[in-house]
Image (cartoon, rainbow, N blue to C red):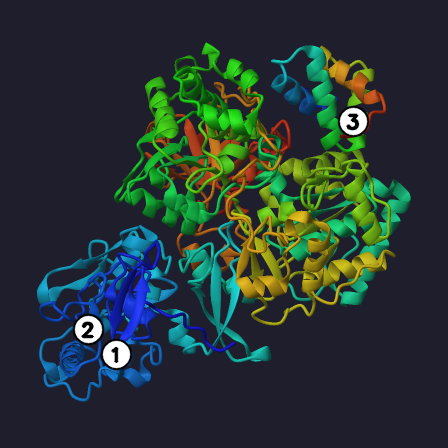
């Protein structure tokens, strides 16, 4: 997984923590977490990795979609 | 200030109202029940002569010097062991009492050397004082060798590096023995023999260094003569003045009297004496705080700025002006080429609040980004996240004194007797009084079983299964009807979702027994004890936070405490034991990349506006890079320059090869430190720092106590560290100036609501305060969440157990966990430059006897320690403290390279590294293996063998 970059590894660690929640809820919570705690360049790298077709959990794909929107950290 | 000698009331204070009134030498005094006549007399201004009594110890009644006359009482009772009674009439000074006391003194002096003028305790000897007070003018039995049989030919024990023991001067008052028992709780000393042969003995008749003595110095402090004396006093003489300041080692934050000789450039620090009025330590200390201050004057100190173009070049000493101008110019040039966000800084938990505050200000205002992080990232960042999510603020809930009211103490992933020894002693005192103990730790730490202490339950869990254990305990609480409904209903939210989650049989102790390795019955019993035995308090350390589920575990503990109503009063709470002296403060001061001072997110426009107006510059509303992200970004080229304040990331951070590669990739590394540490080997600018003896500021300890750090001597570098940071900011074009450190605290108070009532003047007046300290609560807040949580209602958070990705297998069958020991501190930069190396000259690898035997490893053998990321070499120590399958080492010595083998795994929420779980293999080795990452493992034949 590390060959996909540290951001993919880190978000995958987060995804499993939210596995008890419905996928959309989890994705929203994770995207909010990343906006709150991740430097924008890390979020961009994650989105770029997903856009490049990285083999990741579907929740990560949804997170990347949410990050691509312009919602601010809260 | 002249030499400060606190009053000694002879016996400890008793709690309660001053409801007992009595008359002493014609003066009426009222004291709480249980107070001794001696203490009541002292409070009335009638000092009773004493030798075996001191108010840090319970009365002993052996010296017979404190006898008094009491109306209606037979004989002349000892005032130290006689409690007051209503209406009691006491006389402390009569002709008869004087005669008795002189008789006692004659006996003491008949077996004591009469070398007062050349004695190291001359002027600070209670025996000498009492000879004067009692009017001793002759010794009818003779003195010294003339008095017949005596003890004056006994040899001095100089084995301890910091103090000597001269039994010839001992008066057998037992104060040292009792200090070791009652204050320190080690019970290393005893009175050996009977009658005339009685003598103080460390252990079974050996030397101090051969005994269980932990060198806390309580015995030295308690000794009324020169029998136990600091070697510095013997060498330098008695100090003449005191400065009250704060220790710069662990997060207990002990107050000390720095006792000095001389002034100005000739100032000599003679000794550090723990301050009785210190709120955190109340007169106690450990070996580091009391004795290990020699690093401040070590010849390795860097005192002149250094610069070099490349890390392959030699250092060039330069003026402060050149160093600061060069640093500022390089930082701006890198930003011009690579962008505003290409530079950043790391603050230090060893530095003062004021020093940390100016670094984060420099980053946010002068650098124009939020790339500031602190070393708490790699220790207690999950505490910040977890307690903020559940309670609403990132801090422990109690003061240290709270443990005195605990009925059950649960210690999770902490080793207080080694890492927080002064609080550990206080905890042990409460345990000896009868509080029950639960220890959750893979190792059998000292608390599990030590003199007069035995854990009711030792949950020897497999490393990495904390969350499974705390969930299992909560499962028992919920399913066995032990929830405090009144508390939860009134004070908390989200209980329904959490209860439904935790009641799932998948979380039962039986279901997780195979995962945790802890028998289900033991977990159930521990949960019942925690929930039902009165006040239950949780104390935890890095064994909780330094896991891939560190934040989850912090929230799990908070859930458990809320569910049982163990929040908001003395004796309970969730208490992080902070590793370094100012971890709490460095976090408070806005060191995290997502938070401004006071834990307020950078996205909060109203908070940013406060600083934007005061600092006169717009601030970013997006979080910056955390330390591990800085390393990753250095390797991808988007992060190019790093200012490192007082941290040795090249030794302390995990997966060292990754860290070294990142540091080597940077265009500019600026290190501000006392020494040329491991990180400085990658630096282009080295800015000499100040030791705690030179700093002026404040530290905030683990109980949120803000203590003054007062300069004992002038800065040896010519500048305070905050001045250097301000001058760099100014050289970068951002105006930043303070006249003194007090002005910085004034700005902190002006902008941070929880510090609104704090100033140097206020701290000087009241001693210390625990934040929140506001104008409404100027005395601070010892216990938090009393009437309500900071966030309003305490929030239960669902805490699934997610195993770490780090797994043992056939190639790496053991799990390595890391920690600290008493005599050394963190990366050892300070303690390795003191005589503390006598106790721990190298890091060792502790192994269970079975794991050692199957590998053909004997105690003391050198072994190779290999993980998936690197290999190093250590000496093996066979220890039944370890469970089968788990090994342990410390990271105090760079040569052992413990962090060569630790991995990039980190806490999901905060990126706090998973130091506590690394799959490893241990094999015998006859050569010193250079600490090396996996891709360049090498062995060399030379070394320590």
- Marks 2/1 in contact by CB < 8 Å: the verdict is yes
Helix, strand or loop at label 3? It is helix
- Circle 1 packing at 10 Å, graded few (<14), some (14-19), many (20+), is some
Q: Which mark is residue B648?
A: none
Q: Which chain is mark 1 on?
A: B
Q: Are marks 1 and 3 on the same chain?
A: no
Residue in the foreground of this view, choosing between B58 and B348: B58
Q: Which chain is mark 3 on?
A: A
Q: Which chain is mark 2 on?
A: B
Helix, strand or loop at label 2? It is loop
In the figure, residue B517 lies in which quadrant? top left
Q: Is residue B920 visible?
A: no
Say above or below: B674 vs B549: below
Q: Is residue B815 visible?
A: yes
- In the rendered image, which residue does mark 3 sit on? A43
Say above or below: B142 vs B902: below
| Mark 1 or 3: the one toward you | 1
Residue in the foreground of this view, choosing between B253 and B791: B791
- In the rendered image, which residue does mark 1 sit on? B130
Q: Are marks 2 and 1 on the same chain?
A: yes
Give x and y (percent) for residue B919: 51, 26
């Amino acid at each position: 997984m590390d060959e996909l970059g540290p951001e993919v590894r880190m978000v995958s660690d987060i995804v499993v923590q939210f596995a008890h929640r419905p996928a959309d809820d989890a994705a929203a919570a994770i995207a909010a977490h990343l906006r709150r705690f991740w430097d924008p360049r890390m979020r961009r790298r994650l989105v770029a990795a997903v856009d490049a077709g990285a083999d990741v959990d579907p929740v990560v794909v949804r997170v990347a979609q949410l990050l691509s929107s312009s919602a601010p950290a809260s | 200030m002249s030499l400060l000698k606190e009053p000694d009331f002879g016996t400890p204070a008793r709690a309660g109202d001053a409801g007992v009134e009595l008359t002493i030498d014609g003066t009426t005094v009222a004291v709480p029940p249980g107070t001794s006549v001696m203490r009541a007399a002292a409070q009335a201004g009638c000092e009773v002569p004493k030798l075996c009594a001191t108010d840090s110890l319970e009365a002993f009644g052996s010296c017979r010097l404190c006898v008094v006359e009491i109306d209606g009482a037979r004989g002349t009772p000892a005032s130290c062991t006689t409690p007051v009674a209503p209406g009691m009439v006491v006389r402390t000074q009569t002709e008869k009492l004087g005669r008795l006391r002189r008789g006692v003194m004659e006996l003491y002096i008949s077996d004591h050397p009469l070398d007062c003028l050349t004695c190291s305790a001359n002027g600070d000897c209670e025996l000498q004082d009492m000879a004067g007070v009692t009017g001793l003018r002759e010794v009818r039995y003779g003195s010294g060798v003339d008095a017949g049989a005596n003890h004056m030919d006994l040899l001095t024990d100089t084995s301890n590096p910091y103090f000597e023991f001269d039994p010839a001067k001992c008066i057998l008052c037992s104060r040292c023995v009792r200090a070791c028992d009652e204050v320190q709780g080690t019970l290393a000393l005893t009175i050996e023999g009977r009658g005339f042969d009685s003598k103080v003995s460390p252990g079974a008749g050996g030397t101090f260094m051969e005994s269980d003595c932990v060198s806390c110095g309580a015995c030295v402090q308690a000794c009324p003569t020169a029998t136990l004396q600091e070697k510095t006093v013997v060498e330098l003489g008695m100090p003449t003045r005191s400065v009250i300041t704060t220790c710069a080692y662990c997060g207990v934050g002990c107050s000390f009297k720095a006792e000095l000789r001389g002034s100005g450039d000739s100032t000599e620090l003679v000794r550090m004496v723990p301050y009785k009025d210190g709120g955190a330590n109340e007169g106690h200390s450990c070996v580091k705080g009391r004795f290990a201050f020699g690093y401040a004057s070590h010849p390795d100190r860097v005192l002149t700025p250094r610069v070099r173009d490349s890390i392959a070049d030699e250092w060039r000493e330069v003026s402060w002006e050149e160093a600061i101008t060069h640093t500022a110019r390089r930082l701006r040039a890198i930003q011009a080429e690579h962008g505003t966000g290409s530079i950043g800084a790391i603050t230090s938990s060893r530095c003062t609040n004021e020093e940390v505050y100016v670094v984060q200000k420099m980053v946010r205002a002068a650098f124009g980004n939020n790339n500031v992080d602190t070393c708490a990232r790699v220790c207690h960042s999950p505490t910040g996240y977890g307690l903020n999510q559940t309670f609403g603020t990132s801090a422990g809930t109690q003061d240290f004194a709270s443990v005195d009211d605990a009925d059950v103490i649960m210690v999770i992933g902490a080793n207080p007797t080694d890492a927080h020894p002064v609080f550990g002693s206080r905890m042990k005192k409460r345990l000896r009084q009868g509080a029950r103990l639960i220890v959750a730790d893979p190792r059998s730490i000292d608390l599990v079983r030590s003199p007069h202490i035995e854990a009711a339950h030792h949950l020897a869990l497999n490393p990495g299964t904390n969350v499974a254990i705390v969930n299992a305990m909560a499962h028992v609480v919920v399913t066995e009807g032990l929830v405090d409904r009144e508390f939860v209903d009134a004070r908390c939210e989200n209980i329904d979702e959490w209860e439904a989650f935790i009641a799932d049989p998948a979380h039962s102790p039986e279901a997780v027994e195979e995962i945790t390795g802890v028998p289900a019955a033991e977990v159930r019993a521990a949960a019942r004890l925690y929930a039902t035995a009165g006040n239950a308090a949780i104390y935890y350390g890095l064994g909780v936070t330094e896991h891939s589920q560190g934040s989850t575990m912090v929230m799990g503990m908070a859930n458990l405490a809320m569910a049982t109503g163990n929040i908001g009063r003395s004796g309970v709470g969730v208490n992080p034991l902070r590793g370094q002296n100012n971890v709490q403060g460095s976090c408070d001061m806005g060191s995290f990349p997502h938070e401004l001072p006071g834990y307020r997110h950078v996205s909060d426009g109203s908070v940013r506006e406060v600083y934007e107006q005061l600092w006169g510059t717009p601030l970013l509303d997006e979080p910056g890079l955390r330390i591990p992200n800085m390393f990753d970004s250095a390797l991808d080229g988007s992060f190019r320059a790093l200012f490192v304040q007082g941290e040795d990331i090249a030794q302390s951070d995990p997966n060292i090869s990754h860290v070294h590669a990142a540091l080597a990739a940077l265009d500019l590394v600026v290190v501000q430190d006392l020494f040329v540490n491991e990180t400085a080997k990658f630096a282009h600018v080295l800015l000499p720092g100040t030791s705690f003896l030179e700093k002026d500021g404040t530290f905030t300890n683990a109980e949120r106590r803000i203590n003054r750090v007062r300069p004992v001597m002038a800065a040896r570098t010519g500048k305070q560290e905050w001045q250097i940071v301000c001058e760099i900011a100014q050289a970068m074009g951002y105006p930043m100036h303070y006249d003194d450190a007090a002005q910085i605290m004034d700005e902190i108070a002006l902008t941070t609501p929880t510090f609104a009532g704090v100033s140097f003047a206020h701290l000087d007046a009241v001693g210390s305060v625990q934040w929140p300290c506001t104008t409404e609560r100027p005395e601070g807040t010892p216990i938090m969440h009393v009437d309500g949580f900071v966030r309003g209602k305490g929030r239960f958070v669902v805490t699934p157990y997610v195993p770490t990705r780090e797994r043992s297998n056939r190639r790496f069958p053991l799990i390595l966990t890391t920690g600290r020991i008493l005599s050394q501190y963190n990366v050892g930069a300070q303690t390795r430059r003191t005589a503390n190396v006598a106790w721990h000259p190298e890091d060792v690898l502790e192994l269970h006897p079975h794991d050692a035997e199957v590998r053909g490893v004997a105690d003391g053998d050198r072994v190779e320690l290999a993980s998936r990321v690197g290999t190093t070499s250590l000496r093996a120590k066979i220890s039944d403290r370890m469970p089968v399958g788990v090994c342990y080492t410390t990271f105090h010595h760079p040569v052992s390279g413990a962090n060569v083998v630790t991995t990039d795994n980190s806490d999901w929420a905060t990126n706090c590294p998973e130091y506590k779980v690394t799959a490893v293999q241990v094999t015998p080795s006859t050569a010193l293996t250079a600490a090396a990452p996996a891709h360049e493992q090498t062995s060399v034949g030379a070394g320590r063998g």
